[in-house]
Amino acid sequence: MPDNARIYIGTSGWSYPKGEGTWAGYFYPSGKVNELEYYSQFFNTVEVNSSFYRPPNPGYVYNWVKRVPKDFFFTVKLWQKFTHPKMYKEATGEEAAISQEDVDRFRQSIEPLANSGKLGALLAQFPPSFKNDKYGQQILQAVIRTFGSYRLGVELRHRSWSDDPNFPQLLCDNNISWVHIDEPKFQSSVSAEVPQTSDVAYFRFHGRNKEMWWQGDNETRYKYLYSTEEIQDLASKVREAAGKTNLMFAFFNNHWQGYAPRNAVDLQRSLQLPFKDVSIQIPLQDDNQPENR
């Protein structure tokens, strides 16, 4: 591992208080606890996913800054209005017509992170149906123009992007990170191996629960615990990317019952990074273990 590589490992989101996949009793202890403060004892970064549904209140974000250590980074997922217009319309009943007011509202929501130096990157996650066609290229370029002044990563999941040998140059020219993703693979899926296109590496590990990927809900889809061998394979990819960059983020999104923080510690350990063991807070429960495939 290069001495100058700054490696940040954490989870996609930190608050899962309800439902079958809750972290209560698995990662978070019983009783009253500030979840972000507790989380930041174990990890040096977190990916904010609530911003996908609406820009967060800047007052809340300012309080996040006060809750975490000095060297802690947040990455923030872009509002779905910018990346998922169909989903936005289904959720709100309104067309996703982007205005300068929308851009300003989102920028203001993350100002406390940017001003404090705790904004690691923005994540533009596009849906699996988002293709490399004229429309897709226009949308992507608009996102790059609008948010390219930040460290920006794009998560592209349709194979048309990785099938195009000329596409990576657009990201390279704008220093945009092509997010490396690990998730179940289908005929339309983007390639498992994508090039490094910026000075920031960004990984997202969603789990490999192929059977529940399309028919499961927002909890059961992510019921997947990476095995020791799989973690070692992910670690080799992270290690290779870290050798090409100065800053690297890796987030586990397999959030079912605290699987994500557990695997994040596994990755820290595999990379021989300092870690604080969370195995006591996340007990092994054989009846809840997914069948890894």
Image (cartoon, rainbow, N blue to C red):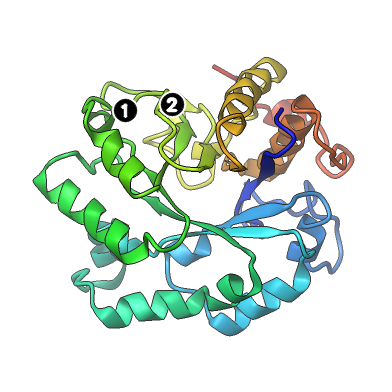
The answer to whether residue 64 shows anywhere in this view is yes
**Residue carrying label 2:** 184
- Describe the element under mark 1 as helix, strand or loop: loop
**Quadrant of the rendering where the C terminus is positioned:** top right
Q: Nearer the viewer, mark 2 or mark 1?
A: 1
Which quadrant of the figure has residue 64?
A: bottom right
Amino acid bearing label 1 = Ser
Which quadrant of the figure has residue 188?
A: top left
Which quadrant of the figure has residue 233?
A: top right
Task: Name the foreground residue: 267 vs 218.
Answer: 267
- Percent across and percent down for residue 91 are 31, 66
Q: Residue furthest left?
A: 134
- Percent across and percent down for residue 277 are 87, 39
Measured along the vertical axis of the image, is residue 185 above or below residue 143?
above
- Describe the element under mark 2 as helix, strand or loop: loop
Left or right placement of residue 8 versus residue 222 in this view: right
Left or right placement of residue 26 versus residue 173 in this view: right
Q: Residues within 10 Å of mark 1 (few under 14, many from 20)?
A: some
- Percent across and percent down for residue 219 are 54, 45
Left or right placement of residue 87 versus residue 136 in this view: right
Question: Would you say the residues marked 2 and 1 are in contact, meaning their CB atoms lie under 8 Å apart?
Answer: yes
The answer to whether residue 20 shows anywhere in this view is no
Badge 2 or badge 1: first in the primary sequence = 2
Measured along the vertical axis of the image, is residue 228 above or below residue 135?
above
Measured along the vertical axis of the image, is residue 197 above or below residue 29?
above
Amino acid bearing label 2 = Pro
**Residue carrying label 1:** 189
Q: Residue at x 52, y 73 (%)?
A: 110
Task: Name the foreground residue: 124 vs 34.
Answer: 124
